[in-house]
Image (spheres, rainbow, N blue to C red):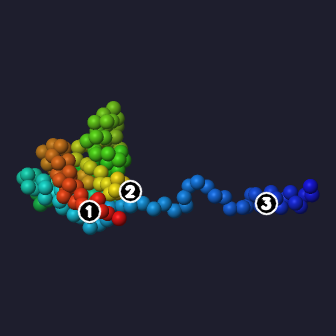
């Protein structure tokens, strides 16, 4: 074979477009502003009905805050705690209570990770089985009650989640 042919073949192989298995553009779904606002409000109102002053935070699937509501007399610290519960859900993909129960072996270490609190009161927000965000609640007497309020909010808006596009 002659050298120009080999050089041409080598350059064709080196500079030809390469197709890889990974996609160049990835689409994802995330909780929208209106749904985030409505979930936060529903959680705060569910707790208020029980006489509890709380904060509720909704984060999107990337962990960015979409909505925050603090009831009139809720401590200012409840805002941070609610957000960090929601962040634990984004990290784990499960309710913060499940994460706490399933990974008790690393719970104390995880609580030292900036922005994460492994406490009860955070729930995943799913649309058609896909994680689109998380709802965290703080301020009720006990994390199990925070989670009750978050669950009430998700149950109230379940139809919107089921039919989300």
Q: Residue 62 bears which disc, if any? A: 2
Return the residue nearer the eye: 92 or 9.
Answer: 9
Q: Quadrant of residue 45?
A: bottom left
Extreme-bottom residue of the structure: 34
Work out whether residue 152 or residue 83 is closer to the camera in this orientation and state it.
Answer: 152
Mark in front: 2 vs 3:
3
Q: Could you say which quadrant of the image residue 24 lies in?
A: bottom right
Q: Which residue is mark 3?
A: 11
| Distance (Cα) linking label 2 and label 3 | 42 Å
CA–CA distance in space, label 1 to label 3 = 55 Å
Alpha carbon of mark 1 to alpha carbon of mark 2: how far? Answer: 21 Å
Q: Tag 2: Cα neighbours inside 10 Å, few (<14), some, or many (≥20)?
A: few
Q: Are marks 1 and 2 in contact (CB under 8 Å)?
A: no
Residue 66 visible here: no
- The image position of residue 136, as x and y in percent, is 25, 52
> Of tags 1 and 2, which is closer to the observer?
1
- As drawn, is 145 to the left or to the right of 60? left
Seen at 33% across and 36% down, the residue is 103
- Residue 74 falls left or right of residue 61: left
Q: Is disc 3 placed on a helix, strand or loop? A: helix
């Amino acid at each position: 074979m002659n050298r120009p042919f080999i050089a041409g073949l080598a350059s064709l192989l080196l500079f030809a477009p390469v197709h890889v298995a990974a996609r160049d553009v990835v689409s994802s779904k995330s909780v929208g502003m209106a749904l985030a606002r409505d979930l936060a409000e529903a959680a705060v109102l569910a707790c208020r009905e029980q006489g509890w002053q709380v904060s509720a935070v909704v984060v999107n699937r990337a962990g960015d805050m979409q909505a925050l509501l603090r009831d009139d007399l809720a401590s200012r610290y409840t805002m941070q705690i609610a957000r960090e519960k929601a962040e634990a859900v984004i990290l784990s993909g499960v309710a913060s209570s499940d994460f706490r129960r399933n990974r008790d072996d690393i719970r104390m270490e995880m609580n030292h990770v900036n922005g994460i609190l492994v406490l009860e009161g955070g729930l995943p927000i799913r649309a058609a089985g896909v994680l689109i965000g998380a709802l965290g609640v703080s301020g009720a007497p006990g994390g199990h009650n925070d989670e009750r309020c978050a669950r009430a909010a998700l149950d109230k808006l379940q139809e919107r989640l089921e039919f989300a596009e």
